Amino acid sequence: MMNLDAAGKPSRPDTATDFFQPSDADALQMSELHVRFDGRTYRYGQYCYDVLKDALAYARLDQGRSAQTGAPDDEASAWTPPMMPSESEQRQMDQLQVRFDGRHYHYQSYRYDRLADALDYARRHA
């Protein structure tokens, strides 16, 4: 499935990962609505979302029903690229068949937020 921005143009894929960087239109909406990407999840206020459109939808809803002029102050950048595994971590992942999709680590049908957890489980069940 391909992500499309408001003009119908595809978001730009990050060639090193399986996730999409936000299109210019998405980045503009993120900025206007105070939605941030922390390298793993999209954040609005205290809430975290796996899907950008869900974060944007809730931000619109919240700001529309609120007398506030915006979301809580958040000086973080709108887009923080996820931390990529180092070369030594990648070698361990390859040996144990753990993969990284740009946001999560996967072993068989399991998904992990932390590499250490994925590697630990893979070692115990290899």
Image (tube, grey):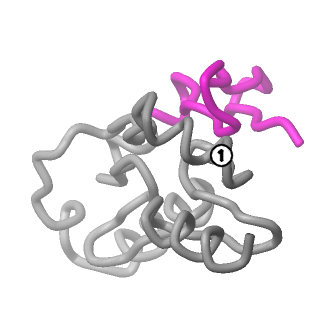
List x then y, in percent, for residue 19.
65, 39
Q: Quadrant of residue 25?
A: top right
Q: Specify the quadrant that holds the C terminus.
A: bottom right
Residue that protrudes farthest toward the right in the picture: 1
The answer to whether 47 appears left or right of 106 in the picture is left
Amino acid beneath label 1: Asp
Helix, strand or loop: magenta stretch? loop
Foreground residue, 105 or 8? 105
Residue ID for mark 1: 101
Residue at position x 29%, y 79% in the image: 66
The correct choice, above or below, for 49 with respect to 39 in the image is below
List x then y, in percent, for residue 67.
22, 77
List x then y, in percent, for residue 44.
34, 65
The correct choice, above or below, for 64 with respect to 8 in the image is below
Q: Residues within 10 Å of mark 1 (few under 14, many from 20)?
A: few
Q: Specify the quadrant that holds the N terminus.
A: top right
The verdict on residue 66 being magenta is no
List x then y, in percent, for residue 83.
37, 40
Foreground residue, 5 or 36? 36
The region drawn magenta spans 1-27
Foreground residue, 126 or 62? 126
Foreground residue, 12 or 86? 86
The answer to whether 40 appears left or right of 2 in the picture is left
Residue at position x 55%, y 46% in the image: 92
